[in-house]
Image: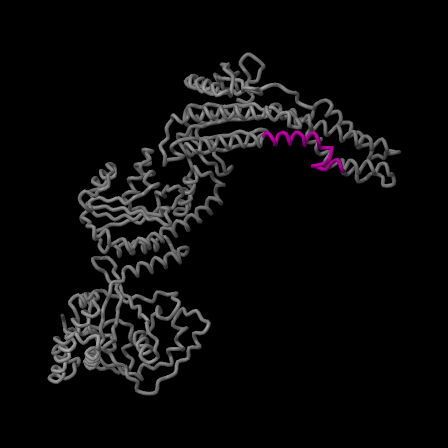
Amino acid sequence: MLIKSVAINSNIKETLGLEQRLSLMPFQRFLLKNIADPVQQSNIIPKLVMEYLEGVLMERGEPTPENLSEFTDVFGLIHRLTNSITNLDDRFWGLAFPVPDKAFFGRDTFYDLLDSDLTLLPDSGGAPFYPDIAFTNKLLYILVLERFYGIKGVDSNMRYVYFKHGVPQYVELKVDFSFVEVALKGELPRLDFSCLRDKNVEGFDDIEPLLSSINLEAFSFTGISILRFVDCNREQVFNRVQQIVADLSRFEKQSFHRDVSSILSTMVGTTAISHSFFPVLELNGFPILKSDLVKDSIFFGELILKEREKCQSGIFDYLKAPYTISYGVETGMDSFDETLIAHLKQLKLASYVCFPLRHNGDLVGFLELYSRDLKFDNEKVVSIAPYMPMLTLLAYELAVGFKAKLNQVILQNFTSLQEAVQWRFNQVAAHYLLEPKLEKILFENVYPLYGAVDIKNSTLLRNLAYKKDSLYRINQLDQILRTIPVHRATEQQFMMRLEHITQWLNEGYIDKYLVDILSFFQEEVPVFMDNLPLDNAEIQELRDMYREGEDIVRGKNNRFAMAFEQSLSTLNQMINKELTTFNQYIQDRYPSYFEKFRTDGVEYDAYVGQSITPAKVFNVELLREFRKQQVISMAEIGQQAHAIIDDLPIALETTQLIFIHPNPIAISFRQDERRFDVEGGYNIRYQMIKKRIDKALIKDTKERLVQPGCIALVYATRRVEEELKGILKEVHEMGLIGANIESLVLEELQGLNELRALRVRIAGFGQTALFR
């Protein structure tokens, strides 16, 4: 214990004329009260201390700033007595004047703390009531309010920061006024609490009208204050995390990283232990590898990059079911992972611990602690546990806030995304938030699956339906013209125009003159109708009939086109349903990219590979399974199309086409079109083949490859032929296709030669008429 006068920044205004006096009398009255307490009758310590104190006071009188060294024994008794009663941590214990702005006695560690760079922290801000607002003489105002106005239980909340081995540590000053008496020198002022009515107290200005009624100079303070600095690292970290979460949107990157690093340093309490706090900011547990928050990570830094390059799945399996990883903490307790342990040894780490952070059962981040010099003990590891809920909250809020920003970037720069590739778009968006430059989204070494279900002769049938509707309209218009008694010049000109349209339709020139024909019916006919004579009832009746017939739902003028579109829609609904089932089959086995395109039928592209789903090992054997399912899907589509043909207003038939490309390709996201396309010169050949084979003819014939009731499988290399034949045999055994397999060579397609195909008949398929 030391006798030493040291000023303390307790936010007390020294220039104020405060009346104070050192005295042991309040301590003496405290002892007398304890001796008189029946509960304390068996405790002889207060009696012994009282007897000793009376002798000291009789011999030496009261302590003064000049004779403090004469009372070292009494101050020591106060220390032992108060700490035996409270049983609190007394490392930073000391005594001060009744106005606690100067200490005069205390433990060595107490003075070591005062001699350090101990700094009073500003108020926490935004508190709901005045105890959390820092203001001058707060300690004294609280004491007066308690002693004279009965307002108790108010904490001064005086917190300080100091640095221990370069690491910020936080303590809170607890002032015990048990041995301080406060005397009023005049009349007690009345407090007006109306200033707080219906008000959210946020600063000193809100409570100043209340405290201004109290003149501290009207009070005298006698006795000795007991000071105790207590560790408040946990509370300060919790408050700091809450502030970060509340102001997350306004944080700048540098200040955020600085604050998080400071929080982690306070937790571990030493610079010998390095740390990394890593929120999981992605979907499907796939982390953002280039985030500044992971730059100091061991597990998610170099190791995960190595794992990614190898396209292994160990890291990602761990993300799905994370557990605490430890190394060098306790003998026999090291995690059993040879790759990880070898990596830690290579980095010459003495100790390493990785804690997963979970919010409501979901993984939201990780905390790593590691050291090259210090061997952790269990006590150090356990001491981190109280901080876990705070870091978990921060990781969760970071993930939520970051995801909202990711979605904004994705919506602005990309499009709605499939789950299989969402992680990559999130990663690019995250990098964009860190550095505003969009990366190219590229997936390499993916295997394409292409299929097309087309409507046989759809263009011809659509034109035929449109021709029938147009001729029906022309008959109505011709009837109107014959009813007009005398043709004016405009009507004669309309008749000539009608004759041209009729000629084009009868001669089959719909494609060539389609724009002119549409313009005639949509623009010229309405003008003609509006200028018909109004005094002819028969003409008016014919005009009304024509206009009623134009109704898109009930009108007879569109009945053939409507029949075609209804038939086409029914077929496409069935096709889409089956392809959705096919896609689900793929996704259940290996998450992949799948995209459908609407033509008169439906085309689809699927891309399968490790780069799309790096969290799962890709086995090339899956390709055979997926190709087999392609054939099964096409066979079922063909059978269902045939089954419903009699229920269609117009008998439409489907053709089924599959293109087998055995080699992996690369695809990239085209931001201008907001879709994926092939990447590279060689891969473009795949796209060319895909777009042209639906019109392919069998070599040396005029026969089209694709035919109703058949499935055509096109391929460019013979090495897949035996596999395809094996697949077709298995699908035949399922009863979906016939046993006969046609091996065909295709005519050259604009520079594409040597394409081959297998063609099989779908089981149960027959022929029918086109129109009824």
Residue 45 rendering spot, x and y as whole percentages: 15, 74
- In this view of the protein, which residue sits in the foreground, 290 or 170? 170
Position of 412 relative to 543 (above/below): below
Q: Residue at x 23, y 47 (%)?
A: 370
Q: How is the image coloured?
A: one colour
Q: Residue at x 48, y 21 (%)?
A: 734
The image quarter containing residue 771 is top right
Left or right of residue 327, residue 255 in this image: right
Position of 622 relative to 301 (above/below): above
Position of 431 relative to 38 (above/below): above
Position of 137 relative to 507 (above/below): below
Task: Answer yes or no: is residue 379 visible.
Answer: yes
Residue 412 rendering spot, x and y as whole percentages: 49, 45
In which quadrant of the rendered image does the N terminus lie? bottom left
Left or right of residue 149, residue 6 in this image: left
Q: Which residues are magenta?
A: 548-571
In which quadrant of the rendered image does the C terminus lie? top right
Left or right of residue 34, residue 722 in this image: right
Q: Residue at x 32, y 75 (%)?
A: 142
Residue lying furthest right in this view?
485
Task: Answer yes or no: is residue 688 visible.
Answer: no
Left or right of residue 11, residue 410 in this image: right
- In this view of the protein, which residue sits in the foreground, 691 or 188? 188
**564 part of magenta stretch:** yes
Residue 421 rendering spot, x and y as whole percentages: 43, 37
